[in-house]
Amino acid sequence: MGDRLRIADVEHIPTETLVPLITDSFDNLVTVAVAEATNGFIPQRTRRLLRKAEWRLDWQDALLCAAGELQVATERMRYTNDPRLEVTEHRLRRVRHRRHEAEILVKKLRRNDFHNSRERKNGADSRLTAQSWLRSAFPDEYADLLRRERARRNLGEESEAPSFRNVHEQIEYACAHGQITAPGTPEVDALLAADDIVVRRAAADDAKDQEERNPALRHPLLLGRWENALRELGYMVAERAHAQSPHGLGTLPDDFYALPQREAIEVLNARRFLAAVQQRRLEYKRYLRQLTQVLRERERETPHVIALFEAREAADRLLAETHPLEYAFIRAELRPHEEHDGFLPRSLVNSPQRAEIKRRVLAALTDDTWATTSL
């Protein structure tokens, strides 16, 4: 068996053997997602794998892709009275059922990520909140303290990170500075130098051919142009496909079956192409997630980033030591809202109530009424 999986293969493959196959190939992941949704003999370890936090978004995208493929297949079978229609419709229902389950798990994952994010945890820490508000009250002093701490650590005046207009600019910077290793090929170089029409034609050919893919489009430096080309293709074909939008097939209109055969076949072909374009966009999203995750992990491990964080912490401590009474005032204002000593409820972190407390505290520090307020 080659690297390309078949649905019938999945139940016989150990889960640990599947992992590299579905990591490297979105098509294989789609195959496994369909098999898991429709085959009762899939190993439980494989079922659990797809539901793990690190796989849920990919699993959801694979099911979205599979549902689109199966929908256009059932539409064609219904039009041609294909005897396989009933079996394919059953498979589509099972995939849609799994897609609903995946959506619920992804929502849970995003809620957990939101509640456990560094920003939210810091916002629930009274000490860190007070330091943050003190920085807002004395920005010039804090900037001076931070400059001194950076100089003391020989960090110089270079910016903490370049400012990027979008994620693809960030990826380009990462490739240029060795944060991402992505060797070029003649095909990649040719597409990088090509105009948008050539890239769009390559993206269209890649979408039409389920077997022979164009790996150059998946190079980090071409992801942005690939996605733009796919978006344009979606808009170009949506009307011919009688689609709900360039991003979703929707259901066929009631008058479809009254169309002349030639026109009806053209609509079905356009819908199959649009489904393939949407599949490639989901694949693009997956590549982008993988790259941004790598960048986040490498940034956290960079000695320069760690040193900058330590410099900011030191500047925060020095500012609180320079203004101990003001710092104590902020902590006192926060204390009635704490759910236990030193910690604010998570529900307060992004609430209008917190914004109002901060506005009142900073106003008191600005007009020097804080001292009388705290008496």
Image (cartoon, rainbow, N blue to C red):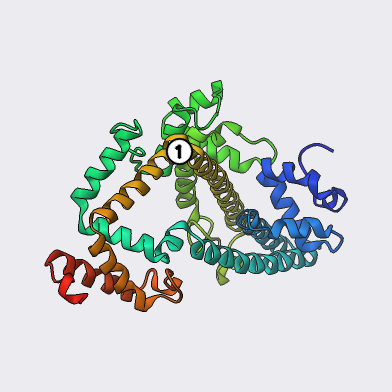
Query: In this rendering, would 24 be left or right of 337?
Result: right
205 is higher (above) or lower (below) than 127: above
Q: Nearer the viewer, residue 58 or 186?
A: 58
Q: How many marks?
A: 1
Query: In this rendering, would 38 be left or right of 284?
Result: right
Query: In this rendering, would 93 be left or right of 242?
Result: right
Query: Which quadrant is home to the C terminus?
Result: bottom left
Q: Residue at x 71, y 45 (%)?
A: 22
207 is higher (above) or lower (below) than 44: above
Query: Which quadrant is home to the N terminus?
Result: top right
Q: Is residue 62 visible?
A: yes
63 is higher (above) or lower (below) than 223: below
Q: Residue at x 32, y 34 (%)?
A: 152
Q: Position of residue 372 (x, y in %)?
A: 15, 75
Mark 1 lies on a secondary structure that is: helix
Residue projecting furthest to the top: 186
Q: Residue at x 40, y 38 (%)?
A: 169
Q: Position of residue 27 (x, y in %)?
A: 68, 46
Q: Residue 196 occupies which quadrant of the picture? A: top left
Q: Amino acid at mark 1?
A: Arg
Label 1 crowd bin: few (<14), some (14–19), many (20+), radius 10 Å: some
Q: Nearer the viewer, residue 222 or 76?
A: 222
Q: Which residue is mark 1?
A: 225
Q: Nearer the viewer, residue 159 or 40?
A: 159
Q: Residue at x 36, y 73 (%)?
A: 351
Residue projecting furthest to the left: 367
Query: In this rendering, would 40 be left or right of 203?
Result: right
Q: Is residue 251 visible?
A: no
Q: Residue 47 occupies which quadrant of the picture? A: bottom right
Q: Position of residue 103 (x, y in %)?
A: 60, 66
Q: Position of residue 180 (x, y in %)?
A: 52, 32
